[in-house]
Amino acid sequence: MKKICTSFQDAVADIQDGATLMVGGFGLCGIPENLILALAEKGVKDLTVISNNCGIDEWGLGLLLNNKQIKKMIGSYVGENKEFERQVLTGELEVELTPQGTLAEKIRAGGAGIPAFYTPAGVGTPIADGKEAKIFNGREYLLEEALTADFSLVRAWKGDKMGNLVYHKTARNFNPMIAAAGKVTIAEVETLYEVGELDVNFIHTPSIYVQILIEGKQEKRIERLTVKK
């Protein structure tokens, strides 16, 4: 059995200033929103955050940005957050932008114990600056190092008390690979089941990757609402 917390503040209690975090989700889809809120309330600073993007101004990782809690952001997309843009332009935030597929593979490799890999993405662009290049079958590739984190924060649709997780449709996105790449993985689940109640054929993240669990209801905000006229 894993540690099952009764409050989100307790779930993030071990996260201290200067920690490196991986955070699941894509936009606002599949983000561990209550864990992020707990971090905002805790006020930890100088965080390095690895995530596809940084939420929006008023929700998700944008809350930590507004509080100046993030020192460095490693991600692939920044287009929905004006505060992110402002902090980058003023030099308040260090940013490492990575092609989305490369970011996904850097995280997956970290979780699999693979220290580095070669990819053609970024060849001939500023992404290649300072990176080792090598020719395979007449094509140039860049050496990319894997990513790991002190803590991984993920959100699941279902979980059991052993730590097995199931994600809902596109909320699966970055969550499974991030769950595998953290030294400590904290899973925020919508519904927590007894061991044996989940179909083992549909487990996305095995329990071996999860250390802390907490059940909680999410708001599930919409990132950009569009309606017909």
Image (spheres, rainbow, N blue to C red):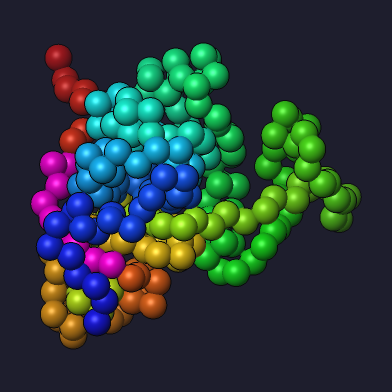
Q: How many marks?
A: 0
- Residue 17 in view (yes/no): yes
User: Which residue is at 72% across, 29% downward?
Assistant: 126
Between 204 and 22, the residue placed more toward the observer is 22
Q: Which residues are magenta?
A: 212-220
x 57%, y 54%: residue: 147
* Corner quadrant of residue 178: bottom left
Q: Position of residue 29 (x, y in %)?
A: 28, 43
Judge whether residue 159 can be spotted in this image. no
Q: Residue at x 25, y 32 (%)?
A: 59
Classify 148 as above or below 59: below
Q: Position of residue 90 (x, y in %)?
A: 51, 14
Magenta span contains residue 8: no
Residue 33 picture quarter: top left
Q: Position of residue 21 (x, y in %)?
A: 43, 50
Q: Quadrant of the C terminus?
A: top left
The image position of residue 222, as x and y in percent, is: 21, 33
Q: Quadrant of the N terminus?
A: bottom left
| Left or right relative to 217: residue 126 | right
Outermost residue to the bottom: 196
Q: Is residue 150 above or below residue 57?
A: below
Q: Is residue 147 left or right of residue 158?
A: right
Residue 177 shown left or right of residue 217 in the figure: right
